[in-house]
C-alpha cells in the first residue's frame, strides 16, 4: 500500500491555472470578458494571457517575483490573475483607494519588480513612485530597485496617457501565444500577495499558495452553487482577495466576466439588464446604492441575480427590499487571510416555511465552513476551549484548512501570532448556534466591556441602522468612570432626517438591554474610513475619549442640522471585512 | 516568499472524511440514509461511523489494513465508506456478482484483515472462504491468515443469519461515539482498494488516495451540478469506484442516500416517487428496465431526475424516451483507475437550439475533463503525439491529474505500464472534436462490456483453453439488443473432440460468473491470424456482427418467455466501464 509512489500522471500540483487552460478548450467560443465596447472569448483570453506571460518573462520576471498592479475592474487586471502566475510570478493587486504613502509602502515591502498602472491612476501612482524613490535614496537601499512601470491604457477608448514607454496592449501584441507558461513545480508555491489594511498601523502582506487558491475557488463556486455559464458582474473589486477567488472561479465555470470601472447604480443596473447578470458579490453598502438609485438610473431586472455579500449583516427590511427587486442574497464571512470567504450561510430548504423576519435573522448569520475548510470553531480566548453551541456564548472564531494563507510576507512575528495551536485566529468574536451556524458578534478589538458585560458593537450598530433617519453608524467604547467602558455611537443621518441624541437614546432603550444603550451619540457628516471602506474605529476611539458623556444633555439639534446640507453619497465606500 | 512554511492551520490533508464531520454539524437533522423502513440523520450516521471505526480499532485493525466487504447498496456499506478510513484502514468493496473463486483471489491478494458479508451473500462468501482456506493450507502460507468474518444482517428485518459470532449492529452498539477517528497524516495515504476485472486474466487492485478521492468527489458534484439537499438513489453499486465517489459526494452536499437492495423497476419507481429523488447514476441498461416497466410497477415521476450514465452511448430514441418520462441524462466516461468518471459531457446552453437528433449526438459524446483533472488528450499510440482535434482521427485517450489512482496493489509491472510519459493510458480509443469534447470510438480491444460489466476476453479464453476438446479459442464482443455487448467465442476443436455449443456453455457456467458465459459459440476450422501468429480479432468482430445469438436457437425460447413473465431484474447488471 505504501509502495505506490507519486508520479507526474497521478500527482499534479493543484493550481487555478488549470481552469483557464480548460476554459480555453471547453468554452473556447463563449464570452469570457465584457468591458464597455470590448469583449473576448475564452480562447482569446487564454491567448492574451499566454502572450502577457511571455512578455513578462522577456522583461526579466522570474519565479517568485512580485508583479504589482493598481487598477479597477478592467480586463487587464482579470488577465493578470492568470498571466502573472503563468510567468511564475506572484500577483499583488493593490487597493485603488489607498493613498500614495500606503502604495509606496506596499511597493517597497513587496519589492515589486513590475508595477502596472491603470491610466486613471497614473497621478496617484506617480506620487507613490516619487515617495518610494525618495525613500530609497534616503536609505541608500541597494537591495531593492524601483519597479518597471507599465501603463494600462483604456482598452475601449485609448487615451494615450503614459508613464514611461511601456503599455499593456503592447506587451500583449509582442507576446508569444504559444508560450504555455512555467510549470507549477509545487502547489505550495505562491500565487498572490494581498495587503490587508487591518486595523493595526502597518499593512500586512498575505500570501496565497496555488493550492489554497485552487481549493478556495472550488469551494466557493460550490458553496454558492455558481452554475456553469454564470454571468458575473464585477461589483466587488478584484483587489479584494482576488475578487473572493471568483477571478479564477468564473474561468472554472466557463462563465462571463462583466467588468465595470465604477460601481455606480447606473453601471450596475445597465450591466445586469444588458448582459443578463446571474451573479455578483458586494458589501451590504452596495444594497443602498441599488435601492436608492434614481429612476433614470434604473433598468429592469428580469432575471434572478444571486448576490454573495460579506461584512455586517444587512438588516431584515433591506434584505426584503432587495429580494423584492429580484436579488437573491447569500451571506458570507471571510478575511484576506482565508483567501476570501471562509463561511457561507448555506440555505436550508425547511427555512422557507418560516416567517420572513425569522428567515432574515437566519440569513444574516455568517454560516458554515466552505467545503475545503477542514474545521471552524468558536473558542474561549483564554482557555482555547470550544464555547457551547448555544448562539449566546461569545468566543473567537478560529479556522483551519488548506485555504488559509501561507502567512504574512516578511513578518514572522505576526505569522506566529496568527497561527496558534493548529488554528488560524481570526480576531473576530462570534457565537455558534446548535445547528453549527456561526454568527459574528464583533471584531475582538471592537467589543465594549461595560460593567463586566460584553457589548457587541456590531449588534448595536445593526439596531441603529434600522432607525429610519440613520444612514450609517459606528459604535466604539468610550471610558466611563463607573462602568469602565460604555458605548459611544457615531451617527451619519440621512439627508432628510432631523433627529436628536435624546430621540436616538429613547429609540435604543426600546430596542435593547439598558446596559447596551449608548451613553453618547455623536452626529458626524461622514465616518472616517480606510481605503477599503472599513470604518477606522481606532480614530473614533480617540475622539470618543475626548467627549463628554451626555446622559442628561440635549444640545444636538444644531449638529444634526449641519449634517443635512451636503452629504456626498458618491463617497460611500464599497467594502466589508473581506 | 519561500520562507512561509506549512503548519497544521494552513495545510490540512485533503480527505473525504471532512465531508461527514461537516455534514454531522451542518446538516445534523437532515435525513442522511433511507433504506426500507429505516432512516438516519447525518448526526446519527456520523455517530454510527465513529462507533464502527472504534470497534474496528478494538478488533485490531490498524493503518493500511484492508477491510473487505461483500454487500449490496445497504446503509452498512455506505457507513463503511467513512468508518473504515476513520479507523486508518482501506476499504475494499467487492463486486457481488463475482464468483467464489474471484472473491477468494481478491481476499488473498488484498490480504483482507476483516471481511464483512451481507446476510444474503453468506453462502457465496462461505464458499470463497473455503477456497481461500484450502489455498492457504496448500501453500502453507504463513504470511497471511484468514480474515475476521462479520455478518451484516438485514437492518430493517433481521434474519438471524450468521457466520461466526460477530454481527455489524453489534459492533455499532459496542462502539464509542466519541471516537473521532485516526488523523489522516498524509493525503497520499490510501483510502480504498477496488479490483477491476481489467483486460488481463488476474484482477488488478486499484488503490485510491485520500487526496484523489477528495478531489474527484469535489469535481463530480461540480461537473454534474449536484446541488445541496440532493436526494440520491443508489441504482449504481457502491462497489463500483465507491459509487463513482458519490458515497462521499452525498455527504459533501448534505443530500439523502436512498439505498435499495435490488435495482428492479418497481423499487426504482417507488423510491423516486416516495422520496422525490433528484439524482441517480446508472449504466444505460437501467434505462431499459425503467422504460420496460409494467404498469403496476410504475409510479408517477413528478420531479426532474438527473441521471449520470457511463459506458456505451445510449441511442437517441432511448434518450428521448427517458427525457419524456422526466429524466435528464448526462453522459460520462471513466474507469476504476480514474476514481470514477473522468470526463463528463457538460451541456452547453446554445445546444438547446439544435435539432433533437443533433443534440442526442452531442450528448452521446463522453465530454470534457472534470475540474480536478489536469489534462485529457487523445494521442497516437505509436508516436504519443496529440491527434488533430477533428472528431475523426482516432488515438488513445490519456489522462493526468490528482484524481488518478496511486497504482495497482503489488503489481509494479502493470503500474509502470499504465503510467507512461507523464500520462495514464486508458487503453481506450477515441477522437477529440474541435470543441475539445472527447468521444470513445472503441473500447480497449479485449474488453467486452455486457450490461455494464467488464468481461475480459483473455480471462474467458484461458478458461476455454482448459476444456479438453478445445484446441484454440478467441472471444470477441458481439452486439446484443439488451446487454449492449455479449461474449462470442470462436472455437477450434481438437480432431478427436465432438462437442456442442450447449456443452461448452454448460462447461462455462461451472467455471465462471454467470454474466461472463458466452451467448454464442461459433466453431471454426482455424482462427484468422497475422503473420506473427496473433489472432486477428478485428476480423472475428466483423463475423460476430453477422451472427445470431444462440439464446434463441435451442433452449432459449423458454428463457426469453420467462423473461417476459417474470424477468428477474435482480440480476440485471448495473454497470459500465466505470
Image (tube, coloured by chain):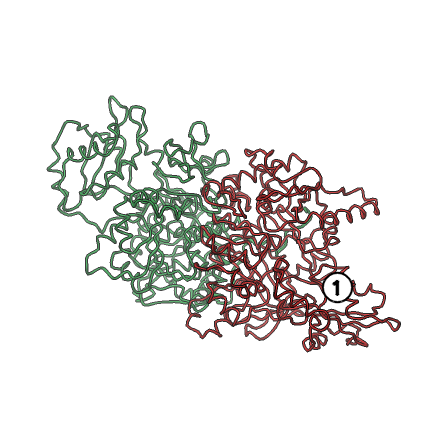
Chain colours: A green, B red
Residue in the foreground of this view, choosing between A162 and B164: B164
Q: In the displayed structure, would residue A59 be above or below residue A337? A: below
Q: Which residue of the protein is positioned furthest toward the top in this rendering?
A: A482
The extreme right residue here reads: B496
Residue B461 or A576: which is nearer the viewer? B461
Relative depth, front residue between A129 and A37:
A37
The x, y position of residue B63, in whole percent, is 65, 40
The residue tagged with tag 1: helix, strand or loop? helix
- What residue is at 76 percent from the left and 43 percent from the top? B144
Q: Quadrant of the C terminus of chain B?
A: bottom right
Residue at the image position 69 percent from the left and 37 percent from the top: B165
Residue A305 vs residue A23, the one in the foreground: A305
The tally of labels here is 1
Residue indicated by mark 1 = B460
In the rendered image, residue A356, in percent from the top left (x then y), is placed at 29, 46
Side of A565 where A102 appears, left or right: right
| Residue B578 can be seen, yes or no | no
Instruction: Characterize the local packing of mark 1: few (<14), some (14-19) or many (20 or more) Cα atoms within 10 angstroms.
Output: many
Quadrant for residue A509, please give it.
top left
Image side of residue B369 versus residue B72, left or right: left
Q: Give percent across and percent down for residue B196.
A: 67, 57
Q: Is residue A381 above or below residue B184?
A: above
Amino acid at each position: 500500500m505504501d509502495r505506490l509512489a507519486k508520479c507526474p500522471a497521478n500527482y499534479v500540483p493543484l493550481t487555478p491555472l488549470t481552469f483557464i487552460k480548460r476554459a480555453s478548450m471547453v468554452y473556447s467560443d463563449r464570452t469570457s470578458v465584457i468591458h464597455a465596447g470590448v469583449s473576448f472569448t475564452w480562447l482569446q483570453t487564454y491567448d492574451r494571457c499566454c502572450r502577457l506571460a511571455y512578455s513578462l518573462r522577456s522583461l526579466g520576471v522570474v519565479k517568485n517575483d512580485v508583479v504589482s498592479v493598481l487598477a479597477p475592474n478592467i480586463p487587464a487586471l482579470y488577465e493578470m490573475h492568470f498571466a502573472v502566475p503563468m510567468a511564475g510570478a506572484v500577483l499583488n493587486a493593490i487597493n485603488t483607494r489607498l493613498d500614495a504613502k500606503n502604495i509606496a509602502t506596499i511597493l517597497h515591502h513587496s519589492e515589486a519588480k513590475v508595477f502596472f498602472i491603470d491610466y486613471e491612476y497614473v497621478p496617484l501612482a506617480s506620487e507613490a513612485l516619487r515617495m518610494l524613490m525618495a525613500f530609497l535614496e534616503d536609505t541608500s537601499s541597494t537591495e531593492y530597485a524601483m519597479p518597471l512601470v507599465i501603463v494600462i491604457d483604456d482598452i475601449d477608448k485609448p487615451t494615450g496617457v503614459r508613464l514611461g514607454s511601456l503599455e499593456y496592449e503592447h506587451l500583449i501584441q509582442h507576446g508569444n501565444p504559444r508560450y504555455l507558461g512555467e510549470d507549477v513545480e509545487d502547489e505550495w508555491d505562491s500565487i498572490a500577495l494581498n495587503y490587508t489594511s487591518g486595523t493595526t498601523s502597518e499593512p500586512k502582506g498575505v500570501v496565497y499558495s496555488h493550492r489554497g487558491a485552487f481549493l478556495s475557488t472550488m469551494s466557493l463556486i460550490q458553496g454558492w452553487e455558481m452554475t456553469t455559464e454564470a454571468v458575473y458582474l464585477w461589483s466587488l473589486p478584484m483587489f479584494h482577495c482576488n475578487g473572493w477567488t471568483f477571478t479564477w472561479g468564473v474561468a472554472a465555470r466557463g462563465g462571463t466576466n462583466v467588468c465595470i470601472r465604477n460601481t455606480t447604480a447606473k453601471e450596475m443596473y445597465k450591466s445586469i439588464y444588458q448582459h443578463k447578470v446571474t451573479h455578483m458579490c458586494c458589501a451590504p453598502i452596495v444594497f443602498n446604492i441599488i435601492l436608492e438609485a434614481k429612476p433614470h438610473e434604473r433598468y429592469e431586472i428580469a432575471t434572478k441575480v444571486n448576490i454573495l455579500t460579506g461584512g455586517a449583516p444587512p438588516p431584515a427590511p433591506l434584505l426584503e427590499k432587495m429580494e423584492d427587486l429580484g436579488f437573491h442574497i447569500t451571506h458570507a464571512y471571510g478575511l484576506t487571510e482565508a483567501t476570501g470567504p471562509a463561511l457561507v450561510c448555506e440555505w436550508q430548504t425547511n427555512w422557507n416555511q418560516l416567517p420572513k423576519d425569522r428567515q432574515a435573522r437566519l440569513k444574516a448569520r455568517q454560516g458554515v465552513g466552505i467545503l475545503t475548510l477542514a474545521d471552524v470553531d468558536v473558542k474561549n480566548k483564554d482557555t482555547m476551549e470550544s464555547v457551547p453551541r448555544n448562539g449566546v456564548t461569545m468566543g473567537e472564531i478560529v479556522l483551519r484548512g488548506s485555504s488559509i494563507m501561507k502567512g504574512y510576507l516578511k513578518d514572522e512575528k505576526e505569522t506566529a501570532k496568527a497561527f496558534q495551536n493548529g488554528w488560524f485566529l481570526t480576531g473576530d468574536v462570534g457565537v455558534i448556534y446548535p445547528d453549527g451556524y456561526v454568527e459574528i458578534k464583533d471584531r475582538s478589538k471592537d467589543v465594549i466591556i461595560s460593567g463586566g458585560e460584553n457589548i457587541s458593537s456590531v449588534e448595536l450598530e445593526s439596531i441603529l441602522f434600522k432607525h429610519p433617519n440613520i444612514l450609517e453608524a459606528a459604535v466604539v467604547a468610550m471610558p466611563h468612570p463607573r462602568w469602565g467602558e460604555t458605548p459611544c455611537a457615531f451617527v451619519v443621518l440621512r439627508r432628510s432626517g432631523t433627529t436628536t441624541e435624546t430621540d436616538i437614546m429613547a429609540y435604543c432603550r426600546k430596542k435593547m438591554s439598558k446596559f447596551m444603550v449608548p451613553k453618547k451619540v455623536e452626529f458626524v457628516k461622514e465616518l472616517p474610513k480606510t481605503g477599503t471602506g472599513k470604518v477606522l474605529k481606532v480614530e473614533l476611539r480617540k475622539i470618543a475619549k475626548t467627549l463628554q458623556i451626555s446622559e442628561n444633555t440635549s444640545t444636538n439639534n444644531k449638529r444634526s442640522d449641519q449634517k443635512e446640507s451636503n452629504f456626498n453619497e458618491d463617497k460611500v465606500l464599497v467594502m466589508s471585512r473581506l
